[in-house]
Image (cartoon, grey):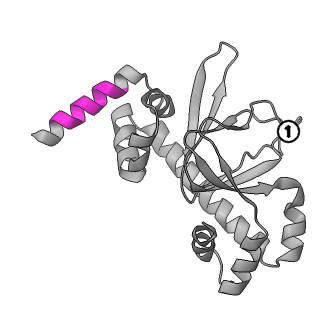
């Protein structure tokens, strides 16, 4: 499993294999059962994660009890709630394991120690975060400008593995539509594909 992390890190640095192995040796990897809540809405995040295996859902529940899915994180994706800009530092989201997961678990309180121990790690982390934020901005812009069917097609193209892995009502919530609308879109596309 650590090899997956090393391969991912190589995209962002020219560290030697030995240097990467040294960094990865310091990183805790944990297994979590399906249904585990990694972070409850309202808690102050103390951990960040990197998915080696499995799928994590980011969601929130509003004051009326309505649950909205904001993102899914699967293999080779980082999971961090950035909320240092808020006054109370409390998370607006919950994180839940949709499947049995194997995750790298980072302790946000020792980040500086890791940066001190491994010079160059901070710039590599910044590059990873910049790529992640860039993708989020691009996806959000496309999402806002597209119709539900286009959103579903984009998901099929960019993240096809989610379609089979994620419960349909959560997928619909993520796409900003009802489960019934998602079913209609899927049927319409299936008919179109068979023509």
What is the tally of numbered marks visible in this picture?
1
Q: Is residue 65 magenta?
A: no
Residue 177 higher or lower than 139, as above or below: above
Q: Residues within 10 Å of mark 1 (few under 14, many from 20)?
A: some
Q: Which of 136 and 167 lies nearest the eye of the viewer?
A: 167
Decide: is 184 above or below 127.
above
Q: Looking at the magenta stretch, what is its main secondary structure?
A: helix
What residue is rendered at 72% in x and 65% in y? Answer: 126
> Could you say which quadrant of the image residue 182 lies in?
top left
**Quadrant of residue 153 within the rendered picture:** top left
- Residue 72 position within the rendered picture, expressed as x and y whole percent measured from the top left: 55, 43
Q: Quadrant of the C terminus?
A: top left
Q: Range of the magenta residues?
A: 182-191
Which residue is tagged 1? 89
Q: Position of residue 181 (x, y in %)?
A: 35, 23
* Point 41% across, 52% down: residue: 158
Q: Is residue 186 magenta?
A: yes
Question: Quadrant of residue 71 in the image?
Answer: top right
Image x and y of residue 93, in percent: 70, 34
């Amino acid at each position: 499993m650590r090899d997956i992390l090393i391969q991912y890190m190589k995209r962002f640095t020219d560290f030697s294999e030995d240097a990467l192995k040294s960094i990865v040796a310091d990183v805790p990897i944990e297994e979590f059962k399906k249904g585990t809540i990694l972070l409850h809405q309202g808690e102050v995040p103390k951990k960040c994660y990197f998915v080696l295996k499995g799928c994590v859902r980011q969601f929130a529940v509003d004051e009326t009890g309505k649950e909205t899915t904001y993102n899914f994180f699967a293999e080779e994706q980082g999971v961090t709630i950035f909320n240092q800009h808020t006054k109370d530092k409390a998370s607006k989201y919950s994180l839940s394991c949709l499947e049995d997961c194997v995750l790298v678990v980072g302790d946000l309180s020792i980040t500086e120690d890791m940066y001190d121990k491994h010079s160059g790690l901070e710039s590599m982390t910044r590059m990873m975060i910049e790529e992640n934020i860039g993708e989020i901005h691009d996806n959000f812009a496309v999402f806002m400008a597209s119709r539900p069917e286009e959103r579903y097609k984009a998901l099929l193209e960019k993240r096809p593995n989610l379609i089979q892995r994620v419960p349909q009502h959560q997928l619909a919530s993520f796409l900003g539509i009802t489960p019934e609308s998602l079913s209609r879109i899927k049927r319409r596309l299936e008919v179109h594909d068979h023509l």
